[in-house]
Amino acid sequence: MAEAIAFDLAVELITKLSSFTLSQIGLWWNVKDDLDDLKSTVSTIKAVLLDAEERSHGVQGGVLEIGQPCCCYILWLKCMQLDDMLQHICLLHRVKDWLEKLKDVLYDADHLLDDFSTEALRKDLLGGSKLMKEVRLFFSSSNQFAYSLKMGRQIKAIKARLTLIGSEAKMFNLRHQTHSFKDNIIGRDDDKAALLKLVLEFESEENVYIIPIVGLGGLGKTALAQFVYNDEMVKNHFDLMMFVCVSDVFDVKIIVENIIKSATGQALNQKLEMDQLQSQLREKIGGKKYLLVLDDIWNEEWEEWVSLKELLVGGGKGSRIIVTTHSLRVAKITSKCQPYVLKGLSDDDAWSLFKEIVFEQRSINPTFVKIGKQILERCGGVPLVIRTIAGALSFKETEKEWSSFKDNELARISQNEGKILATLKLSYDHLPSHLKHCFAYCRLYPKDSKIHVQTLVQFWIAQGFVKQLNPSQSLEEIGFVYFKDLNERGFFQEVGERFSWEGLTCKMHGLMHDLAESVAGTESSIVDSNEIASKVGENCRHISIDPSLIVLFKGKKLRTLLHFPNERNRIMNDEIWDFIISNYRCLRVLKMNDLDFKMIQRSICKLKHLRYLDLSGNFYIESLPKSICKIQNLQALKLNRCSELEELPKKIEKLVNLTHLGCEECYGLTHMPRGIGKLTSLETLSDFVVDKDGSHDGADLSELSGLNNLRGGLVITHLGFVKNAKEKFKAANFKEKQHLRLLDLVWNDYGDDDDDNGGNDDDDDDKSDAKFPSWLSLLTNLVVITIRGPSNFQQIPSLAQLPCLQKLLIRNLTLLEYMDDNSPKGSQGEPESFFPSLKSLYLDNCPNMKSWWRKSSIDDDNEDDTTVIGTSTIAFPCLSSLDIENCPLTSMPLYPSLDDDLRLVKTSSRPLKQTMKMNITSTTPSSSTSSLPLSKLKSFHVHKNEGLDTHMLDEYLKHFTGLKKLTIGDCKEVDLEGKQWEALKNLFHLEIINIPQLVSLPLWLQHFVQLKRLKIQNCSGLRSLFPVFQHLTFLEALFVCKCKELELSAAGVQIFQVQTRLRSLALENILKCRHLPDWIQHLTNLQILSLVDWPNLTSLPDEMRCLTNLQQCQKDIGADWYKIAHIPSGWSFH
């Protein structure tokens, strides 16, 4: 790694020393000759670095490869005389030492030039006339003469060090040279089938059966476990599924936290003690048939495993735990059963994988095929090795390059992880130097952590790894190209965008992380213990660290200090801040998020080389010191989730290099500072807050005029308070902001009452039609648009032709009447160009919007609903989710392709009727049911829907064969008795709210074997849960609330002959009952019992003692306490 860093540093130094700016600075301070001499010396050094790289990697023409396996080393010994061997080994170590010394002085030279440029930038930003600048400069502590002497001495000292190091290169005879993620898993179908038998069919005496998968790193154990985990049969078989990566730190508390997080889909929002975590875990898995994958276990201590296993045995019959591990010993500790040993791919499967990667972008050359198959023989069928080597070869264009790779560089692989790592290093060795830098930097991330790609790229930029060779591309765009290159070579995995707000993320395979750690050497370290903190050398440049250990680290040359938050290291005080500022003056990246500190020291400005500063999640910060604006090299300032932050620094325009300003969820911000519009390099400005009443002298919308490089998302709040809105919107120049992908416009309140067109820049004298500014439809790259009122708009511009728009949300536009001027029979263009990409549409609280289209001469309101709707009707071509609430739309585009969620609340049922008729009438008997409108819909929520009756609902639900969640509320024309809804065989969750005709549970419920959750609320006619309830043995959670006529007795009913799965029972506002029913005792799996607002309840039955699985109860001294005394403390009845 040292030679790659040194070469990259040398290139960077030569680039800086060749720049016109530095040349002018040299003239200004009378050090130009010194800088030219330094450039010449660095160029000489650079010329020998390529040869040094070859020497440091190993032997060219008989010199040992340092990273080679031991067996190769022994073989090499047999081929050499002892004296020659000792000379070569000595030479290798001396070259390594030489490179380390060179790297150190090049870092110092880079820091000096950065200091030089920073001082020049400071001088340029002093302001005032040229004479005033020169006077201030002369009388400052660093006046021209003194500063030039100081810089001249430092340049000469570095040149002398470089000259000495350059002379040493002759001793080594170094020569001058010139420098020139797939979803499919191949070859594992048989393995998957074998595991599926163990997971789904094998009968075990134990409730929880553990299946170990054993294999070398890189064979694909994790991928196979995910392959099984994501199988649809598996998903339908288990009640609960969890996937947790354990890795090499076996901490039971952390593992339990992650299991709970996986089970709930959300992180714990508070720090819990172990007994509280155990209780939560029991609540989540108790009695449930669950599947848990514990990925990548290294722990070989039996006692530690048992301490975890004891917490997991409470699952229901048929539960499974899949363990993946490198070690047979671990497999034996975790399970009594025979482990599933994963082997390498077959020759055919290995070739399929290799071919898919190498020949994806080129035709198949027979010579390449021959060489490729010879290379594959050395890959041992290990998928990770195959992917990595194939990725490297995909960038080699000639047969000569392929043959050279095979004959000269590929070490023979056997089933040994050390050799696999050595083989993976071949791909690293073939990377360009700038990509080597970038890959090694990833060593700072903890193993198996999720990497946010944009943040990683910004780290690379801050360190100077990203070179802007093409002025038309931003540094971040180039950085993403670097990432793409590394990903295509197989250095990353699990690349994707799970949530739009999260952005692109990835992970590194454990072996790739080991490789990054290996090549980074002493350059980088993760410091998470006192021992490591004391061992890290002073020349370490990059660390991620527990903040409490910072004061133990004595190195002063740090360029990166990262903190990855967890619940155990939220420690940050003034002493640590002072230590950072005093000792780490070379810092380029400082990430101190989620540490709960209250203020930032004024002295932070002494970190003048800082490029990236992340203070996100420090809720108590109310303001930033003005001195932060003196860090003029700052490129990224992250303040997200600093919810108490009231204002940004007033002189923010002095941060002339700022490209990213993040202030998401900074709810305390009152305004934006004046001058922010001068930051024309800004690519990220997450939020712009309009000054409500002008009392803060904040920036107005016109400051956005020149910020045309903005990318990603922009939220603008308090737009309702903009004065002279028409003028300000025009001045903001939105139509030029073509790089934006998300735009969220929030009016909040009414402001400029006399400008009732809300910023309409159209020449329209008709003030009765208040229109939204027309520029919105010109931002053709927008992916997400959110418009939130209240405002006085009656129309917004047509967005139907925006080619990239995927999500549209409109909320609280209380005067909005229509979305488009054209009628459905008007000029909408071709159907495929109507919202061609829209996937999610949310219309909320627009009570005046009765039609999507403005009224025209053709009025279709009287069209007969029985009319067959043809294919020419305007419809959303790929809409997946639709949510309409409090919008009385009777006419709108139809939505036959909806396959995720349909939510209709306080709206007309007419568009639904028309949608359902689009293809039903024209469908032939041979047509597949899946082709019918809404047949793939997963969730349907209908509440207070005008015109929806029993017959309509019955007809529609027969076709919703994919439905998993159904909510029917406040539909007074709907009677649920006697329905035949067998088509809803996949229904998982059912809610019935305010259906007065419901007298007892419908008989058809007992046929829904997938139903797990049932909620009945405010059904005033409901008198009994029986006789259907006793047949719902598959139900896991029942919630009944505000059913005033409900009786819970089950007289004459023989109930629960089959054990029920019910684990949660909530009965609220039960007015008629004086005591709990006897049948409670049969709910033996019950863990949660909630009894709220039982005004006539006088006692608990003796049978409560049968509920041995109830979790937590608050101790009391009442007469009936003994009946529930067995329940653990911490829970209470209400």
Image (spheres, rainbow, N blue to C red):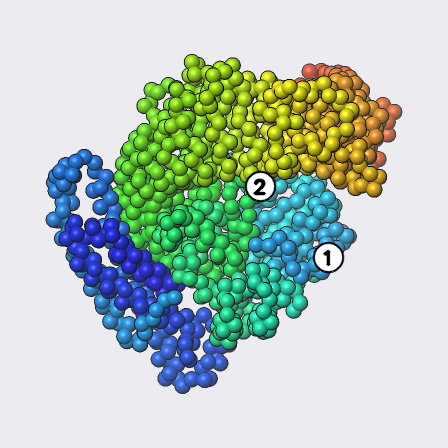
Corner quadrant of residue 1002: top right
Mark 2 sits on what residue? 261
Position of 906 compared to 681: left or right?
Answer: right
- In this rendering, is residue 1046 above or below 610? above
The residue closer to the viewer here, 530 or 437, is 437
> How many numbered marks, from 0 up?
2
Give the mark, 2 or 1, whose residue is nearer the N terminus.
1
Measuring 46% from the left and 31% from the top, which residue is drawn there?
A: 715
Q: Quadrant of the C terminus?
A: top right
The residue closer to the viewer here, 113 or 1057, is 113
Measuring 27% from the left and 67% from the top, which residue is drawn there?
A: 44
Measuring 30% from the left and 44% from the top, which residue is drawn there?
A: 633
Position of 95 compared to 412: left or right?
Answer: left
The residue closer to the viewer here, 235 or 764, is 764
- Give the secondary structure at mark 1: helix
Crowding at dot 2, Cα within 10 Å, few <14 / some 14-19 / many 20+, comes out as some
Corner quadrant of residue 906: top right
The answer to whether residue 1123 of the structure is visible from this angle is no
Corner quadrant of residue 167: bottom left
- In this rendering, is residue 32 above or below 176? above
Mark 1 sits on what residue? 193
Crowding at dot 1, Cα within 10 Å, few <14 / some 14-19 / many 20+, comes out as few
Q: Amino acid at mark 2?
A: Lys
Position of 523 compared to 937: left or right?
Answer: left
Q: Residue 587 appears at what percent x and percent y?
A: 32, 48
Give yes or no for contact between labels 2 and 1 (Cβ–Cβ under 8 Å): no
Measuring 80% from the left and 28% from the top, which residue is drawn there?
A: 955
User: Foreground mark, 2 or 1?
Assistant: 1
- Looking at this rendering, what residue extends furthest in the right direction? 1052
- Looking at this rendering, what residue extends furthest in the bottom direction? 81
